[in-house]
Image (cartoon, rainbow, N blue to C red):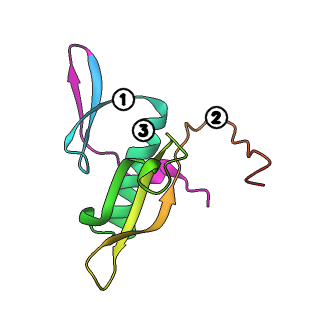
Amino acid sequence: MKVDHSLYSLSDIFVLDETPYFLDYIRNKFIMQQPEEEIRQRMIMFLIEVMKVPISIIEIEVPLSRYSNKTSDRADIIVNYENEKNEKKPLFVVECKAEKMDIKLSSSHA
């Protein structure tokens, strides 16, 4: 799904030592402002403000080794649900790329 990120607000931006940072509400820390991070922050705000996803079920930069020891990759955003045992399970994954970045799928994903 392609989302027009410019329609959604950004989290607060702070300037520290002349470098702009986002205040990431999920990780509760400052993250340096970069093109991909801007997309991630807009997607977070879209999920929270538009889709009404509770902050408590959103995770950022999740190591995929949690699900498979065969990878060192990370998921940009995972939205979870809680099963009947109150365990968090992935509902969906969001991969964020800078707006001008081409997305190429490998043959294993095509």
In the rendered view, tell whether residue 76 sits above or below residue 30: below
Q: Tag on residue 71?
A: none
Instruction: Give the residue number, with chain letter if any, for mark 2.
Output: 101
- Disc 1 is placed on an element classified as loop
The answer to whether any part of residue 52 appears in the image is: no
Contact flag, marks 3 and 1 (Cβ < 8 Å):
yes
Q: CA distance from mark 3 to mark 2?
A: 13 Å
Magenta-colored segment: predominant secondary structure: loop
Given residues 60 and 70, the one toward you in this image is 70
Q: CA distance from mark 3 to mark 1?
A: 6 Å
Magenta stretch: includes residue 61: no
Q: Is residue 55 left or right of residue 105?
A: left
Given residues 44 and 81, the one toward you in this image is 81
Q: Which residues are magenta?
A: 1-18
Dot 3 crowding, Cα within 10 Å, few <14, some 14–19, many 20+ = many
Residue 16 rendering spot, x and y as whole percentages: 20, 20
- In the rendered structure, which disc, 1 or 2, sits on the residue that comes first in sequence? 1
- In the rendered structure, which disc, 3 or 2, sits on the residue that comes first in sequence? 3
Q: Tag on residue 38?
A: 3
- Disc 2 is placed on an element classified as loop
Count the marks: how many?
Answer: 3
